[in-house]
Amino acid sequence: MRNPLTILRQRLAAHREVRADGGTATEAGSILDRDSVRSAPFWLPPFLLIGLFIYGAIIWNIILSLTDFQGLGSPDYSALDFENYVIAFTGGTPSWSSLTVDPVWNAAWNTVVLMVSFSVVCLAVGLVMAILVDQGIRFENTFRTIYLLPMSLSFVVTAKFWLYMYNVETGLVNLILGGVGVGPIEIVQNPDLKLAAVAFALIWQFSGYAMIVYLAGLRAIPTSHFEAARVDGASTIRMYWRVIIPQLRTATVSALVVLTVFSLKAFDFLFSMYGGYQPGPSADILATRMVREAYANGNWAYGSAIAVLLFIMALAIVAPYIYTQYQRGEL
Amino acid sequence: MSEHQPNVSRRTVLTTTSAAAVAGLAGCSGGGGGGDDGGDSPSNELELLHAWSSGDGNAAIAALIEGFQEEHPDVEFAEEPVDGAARSNLDQVVLNKLQANDPPSTFQTWPGKTLEKFDGAYEDIEGDVWDDDLKENYLTGPQEQAQYNGSYVTVPLNIHRINNLFYNTAVLDDAGVDPESLSSPSDVVDACATIDENTDAVPFAQQTSGAWSTVQLWETILLGQAGIDGYEAFINGDGDTAAVESALQSVVDLREYYPSDSSSISFTEANTMVMDGDAAFIHQGDWAAGAYSNEDGFNYGDDWGQVTYPGTSGSYLLNMDSFPYLANNPSPEATRQFLSYCGSAEGQVLFNAEKGSIPPRSDADVSSLNSFQQDQYEDFNAADNQPPSIQHGLAVAPGVSTNISSAFSGFLESYNVSGTAESLVNAFN
């Protein structure tokens, strides 16, 4: 209904009808008279700027990843090949370096694990909180604010905060574990728990966001749906499972996209927590690997290749969302 | 068509659009042109980029510049501290400027193999800056680090020593440990065991959330166990795996005496443990001593002391800052004057009095430095060799350095000695 393309098409059609009524208008002279052309001053500058700085930069990055650009100087665009991608997948000594380069599988796998575990748990926690807050409890706004507050913190603050929380001696996490007779457990540098610890901290930070999105979704569902389910004798769990949650599909998808993108940006968090872009093999993600290659080693082309892989991963998440939105006419 | 009002506005719109486009283009080209100013006409304004934006570093660079300007009042400074931890942002800023062909006059950098990062951007300053005076008065170690591919391109300004073992006197007295009696890295482990037995203090304060402290510790132990020859073999890429493993094993042995929450604390917190008497030893560069001298009632000799890390006597493990001369320099004459001043004993004393490090020149009058610095300076002049630090970028090229850090970030997870040793030896391939 609200598809701007449709509206534009209708407008253009209506416009032509009026011209046809006028009788004397010539189609040939009207190209400058079109709405799209006449509105150009409004849409063209942002279109060009976004085209140049977003899409232009992405395309440039892709081309850069095909070069052998390394160190100072300027890239040589005359010899493009897929060497960097071969190196990224299989490792080995590339032509532009005397050092062996490891493949990116470890970082890629960690990225996927972090992305999936973080997004799924975050959504689940957010949904439960939204349903609880939606029960018409007292101080609803207060709770909502409390849950959402962590999101207003920067990754740097969260990372330092959780470094303290995970402290073996004085951290709250280990105090609680100690209270139930477990531990103390080394968390920050424990290869088995590192990534989980990072995911947990991110979930703490962003489940409030998932809650807000779900809460908006829940509020949009007419009360009659709840009442109808009740009248039909559905239990609370059954009502939510069969009637309410299926209607939250759009909310889920839009929250998922945002959360996934956040998980790809976990770089800041790792950088602050481990004091640099060396979080260790069990928490190394593509973003840290990319910065290491590009800025520590000056392997610009190889860094670009990793960036392209990261971009493809992000696209794989976002594209289906955009496509379904488009199909449903919501774009 | 004539009845349509938009006809008029269309022309207006087109005019406006093209005017805007022209203005936009002019804006772009105007921005790009700004960079040329420096290259064409030599200026007396020195563009100095550094990361000493606060604390002792900031006071030190201010003292250096003030001293320089007294001698050269005609030289102005476009001094720009670049914020950011451990110079990584600074390197990025310099890199962007170099790629835009708009180099600064000079910038703060580690000398040695770190220079490889901006390969081709430096210019030889042998003769005018690196004259006979500098060559006579810099010891071999720092002098080698000032060269890149055999030519002198940078002027080391200060030296922080890496192979120190700091201790809290009261804690060691309680434990009955005499630091002067330790003579090998394994003696440190034994001393830690004694401290652990006899006191409540943490024997060896160390942070393990980041890898750098452990790399430093390992390189010091490697130097102590394998000697200068074994150390140099490693940094030249011919490391002996057994020697590397042995040093790593020594780190693993020490690990038992770390604070239990070492992975959650920073260097500052670890160092504070020593100041508070909660820890006995800390291995660090001598910036650790800077914190001690700022603490009232915590005095050198009485409350804390320092020994050369056991096993490394005769070596002064170097971490230096330096100012290189960049080719296509925006202020050639002023930069040379400034670098010469950085190479003078006077400038170095002014700088290091604030920074807490020591002058790289062997003829400096260090009476204005504190007694700890004077002792360090004495050690420095008496040292048989001055090997470059691995962690602090002097000894290995940036790519190798990244590989070594990666190996240690894995080591901190698993403490796998043989696997890490293999990665370290292979870091050069």
Image (cartoon, coloured by chain):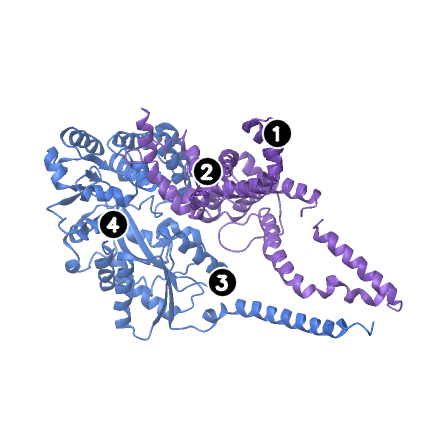
Chain colours: A purple, B blue
Q: Which mark is residue B287?
A: 4
Q: Which mark is residue A203?
A: 2
Q: Amino acid at mark 2?
A: Ile
Q: Nearer the viewer, residue A186 or B363?
A: A186
Q: Residues within 10 Å of mark 2 (few under 14, many from 20)?
A: many
| Residue at mark 3 | B101
Give the mark nearer the N terminus: 4 vs 3: 3
Answer with the quarter of the image where residue B281 lies: top left
| SS under mark 4 | helix
Instruction: Give me the C-alpha separation between circle 3 and circle 1.
Output: 76 Å
- Does the CB distance between marks 2 and 3 fall below 8 Å? no
Specify whether residue A84 is in view. Answer: no
Instruction: Please report the residue visible at 26 percent of the width from the left and 62 percent of the height from the top.
Output: B133
Instruction: Give me the C-alpha separation between circle 1 and circle 2.
Output: 37 Å
The lab-note entry on whether marks 4 and 3 share a chain reads yes
Q: Nearer the viewer, residue B238 or B319?
A: B319
Instruction: Give me the C-alpha separation between circle 2 and circle 3.
Output: 45 Å
- Does the CB distance between marks 1 and 2 fall below 8 Å? no
The answer for which chain carries disc 4 is B
| Residue at mark 1 | A231
Horizontal side of residue A104 vs B176, given as left or right: right
User: x, y percentage for residue B290?
Assistant: 22, 51
The answer for which chain carries disc 1 is A
